[in-house]
Amino acid sequence: MSPSANPPSTNGVNGHANGHQNGTSGADSSHPGFTGIRTAQNPHPRPSNPYQPVGDFLSNVSRFKIIESTLREGEQFANAFFDTDTKIKIAKALDDFGVDYIELTSPAASEQSRLDCEAICKLGLKVSSPPPPPPPLPLSLLCAKILTHVRCHMDDARLAVETGVDGVDVVIGTSSYLREHSHGKDMTYIKNAQAAIEVIEFVKSKGLEIRFSSEDSFRSDLVDLLSIYSAVDKVGVGRVGIADTVGCASPRQVYDLVRTLRGVVSCDIETHFHNDTGCAIANAYCALEAGATHIDTSVIGIGERNGITPLGGLMARMIVADHDYVTGKYKLHKLKEIEDMVAEAVQINIPFNNYITGFCAFTHKAGIHAKAILNNPSTYEIINPADFGMSRYVHFASRLTGWNAIKSRVEQLGLEMTDAQIKLVTAKIKALADVRPIAIDDADSIIRTFHLNLHSKEEKPLIADLTEEEQAKFEEAERQLSGEGEKRALEQEAEADAAPAAKKAKVAA
């Protein structure tokens, strides 16, 4: 990545400064998320990832699948309205990214939902059994399997099958809240599982995948849940689903339930986590550790209320756990493009602290941080932005900046200064930042003018547009910074002088 002398710019409401780079990456601009650093205590750093999970025969951290639900759960987001063309664009983008499944709104929801489901299904190539190696697929065809999400009812199942989907996701509420106030079925009816078994056998008879899920799983009775899951597993359901419908579950609760369920069923386990209490990503990760196989996501996490596990956030978590699996399976550099597309469709901005693509995600500001990140990015980055087609940005226009960050900027501007001169201009930038907020242009102006004054007989003011009051504050801030610098220099000199004397005294003793 080549350094740029231009300040980071935005691209409309969803632009990001992280699309640009203003800092070198130190000794190694490409790091795997963790780079061993040679120290006296660690003279032979190991290249292995210390954050990789401990091996567990039930864990699927390194072999999970994504069921992308932007076109189902995401349609339940407050601002969402996806016309057919938008749905097709999103479906193609998700397929290109590499998700395993794309879940669509139930065709029973509305006539347009049914037509959209059929349109997206026609983008894909349906293969019921492994054929000989096929010729390259046209770009218009999808590789991801298409699912739709329906109630546990034969009418919905028939309608879903007729659209041409690859699989049907069946759901029924099992908590007391939903039994009483939603569908009105009692637990005896649900546990009998006759309705579920009828739907499952019908869908299977059509050669399609079938998943059975409870709704509001974490507020349901455990014995009831296991009884239902065991019954549908015996009739050959492809996956059972656990849904934290209100976002109440903690990672420990998730691990316990999935681990228990793993001992009851032999089929795959899908999980769906809402983010009302901020645990959706952590819950998804713990579910995989406990033996879950599939995770539901949506782009930017959009969905009912606060949404569900975000696709980008899950990628951030999983790339730390298994870098090779994630980078080998998904086109991570496409993430920002997909998020921008969905954000524009639902008329929202990408949050500043969004995983990976937020404009602060790889921004470093404090002087101590900047120095370390320029030497070795792994000091303050667990994720390599280059894996996602992003760049780190070293923020140098603030009172917190350090001379190493300014030195990097001087080099980007093509100027030559000694370290002593860079430290002087750094003090001036910090002094101005104590007077007023400064932009990159302000810092660059100070650097360029300072450099010009070094080689000119006539000294020009570093900042031309300061008011008298600002100029007075700027000069006072310079004096204070100069005094602090002199004081630190004297203290360091005194410490240096004292060290040999202390060593001699120790030897004499």
Image (tube, helix red, strand yellow):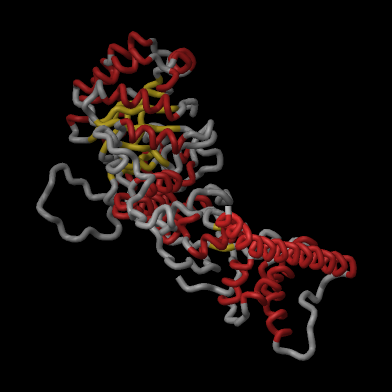
Of residues 77 and 25, the one nearer the viewer is: 25
* Relative to 494, 250 lies left or right: left
* Quadrant of res 195: top left
Residue 108 in the image, given as x and y percentages of width and height: 38, 32
Q: Residue furthest front?
A: 508
Please identify the quadrant where the N terminus is shown. bottom left
Residue found 20% across the figure and 60% down from its top: 136
Above or below, comparing residue 103 to residue 439 in the picture: above
At horizontal 38% and vertical 45% (from top left) the residue drawn is 51
**Front-most of residues 290 and 489:** 489
Give percent across and percent down for residue 360: 57, 54
Q: Residue furthest right?
A: 468
Looking at the image, can residue 226 be seen? Answer: yes
Query: From what the image shows, is residue 108 above or below residue 383?
Result: above
Residue pictured at 57% horizontal, 81% vertical: 414
Query: x%, y% of residue 355?
Result: 49, 49
Q: In the displayed structure, does residue 457 sit left or right of residue 501?
A: right
Residue 156 in view (yes/no)? no
Question: Residue 233: image x %, image y %?
Answer: 23, 23
Looking at the image, the residue that sits furthest to the top is 188
Toward which corner of the image does residue 445 lie, by quadrant? bottom right
Compared across the picture, whether 284 is left or right of 427 comes to left
Instruction: Give the camera-side residue of 474 and 106.
Output: 474
Q: Is residue 319 above or below residue 458?
A: above
Q: Is residue 372 left or right of residue 331?
A: right
